Every structure is written in structure tokens, then in C-alpha cells.
Image (tube, rainbow, N blue to C red):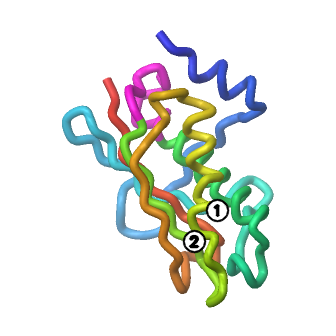
Amino acid sequence: MPNFEARLAELGITLPQPRAPVANYVPFVRTGDLVHISGQISADEGGGITGVVGVDVDLDQGVAAARICGINLIAQMKAACEGDLSRIVRVVKLAGFVQAGPDFLQIPQVVNGCSDLMVATFGNAGRHARSAVGVYRLPMNFAVEVDAVVQVL
């Protein structure tokens, strides 16, 4: 049985408490063996990364913002699995949204910050289908938001 908690420790990641919804939705919904996780923003204990990528935020900061989203997604996965990450079978799909400036075209590279974390944490089970989209605005001016579909036991 994979030990994803140990892998997170090797990566130097301590999962935060899952973020509470900021509007009229739930953090995740399970249907059968799939968990649909609501969008997680680039917020962390230090406040997170806000601003427009390509204007206020550079590419490296955008990648870091997407990684924060990934950490928040894993925290929600853990909550959805009642604290047991070993119940994760597969990260099925990620949808990444980057608050991008008018001339910023490196949207996929930004979302790689989250994708790379999924593979680093879950190995082949972390390889996923994905969308990466540049958007005009994100909630509370956060730089990146990512949602996920995950297969669980």
C-alpha cells in the first residue's frame, strides 16, 4: 500500500487544515468512487499569492501559486478520505485557472506547479488529464485556482 503521507514528508510538505468554502458550495462531493474537489485557491498560512500573472506575478511565482493550490487539493483529498490518503487510487483530472495578464501565454507552465506536485506525491497514480485556462479574474484576486477529480477506495 502506498504511503503518500511519507512522500509528502520527504517533499517537506505539511498539509494545512482544509479551507472552508467562501460561498454557497461544499469542499468536495463524492459520487461512487470519484471525488470532485471544489477549486482551491493559491492561499496559504502566509496569505498566499495574489495578483495577475504576467503583470504583478512572474512565471516562477505563478508556478509556486499552482503548487499551493495542489497542497490545498491534497488537504481536501485527505478530508474526503476520512484522513487516509492511502485510499487515493488516481488523480483523474485537474482544471487549472490562472488570472493572467493580456500578454501572458505560459498558462500550462503555471499549472504544472500543481501537476508536478501530484506526480511527485502520488507517482503514476498522480498522472492526470488536465485543462489549463487563462482567466480575467479569480476570487479575492488570487493568482491561481485548481479543482480536481480523484478516484478513491
Q: Is residue 76 above or below residue 53?
A: above
Residue at screen point 44% across, 52% down: 94
Where disc 2 sits, the SS reads strand
130 or 12, which lies in front?
130
Residue type indicated by callout 2: Val
Q: Is residue 100 above or below residue 127?
A: below
The image quadrant that residue 71 belongs to is top right
Q: In the image, which residues are magenta?
A: 77-90
Between the residue at mark 2 and the residue at mark 1, the CA separation in whole angstroms equals 8 Å
Residue at screen point 49% across, 28% down: 124
Cβ–Cβ under 8 Å for marks 2 and 1: yes
Percent of width and height locating residue 70: 58, 48
Q: Earlier in the sequence, mark 2 or mark 1?
A: 2
Where disc 1 sits, the SS reads helix
Percent of width and height locating residue 84: 47, 22
Q: Which residue is mark 1?
A: 110
Horizontal relation, residue 109 to residue 60: left or right: left
- Mark 2 or 1, which is nearer the eye? 1
140 or 56, which lies in front?
56
Horizontal relation, residue 94 to residue 142: left or right: left
Q: Quadrant of the C terminus?
A: top left
Q: Which residue is mark 2?
A: 98
Q: Residue furthest left?
A: 32
User: Would residue 138 be visible to someone looking at this image?
Assistant: yes
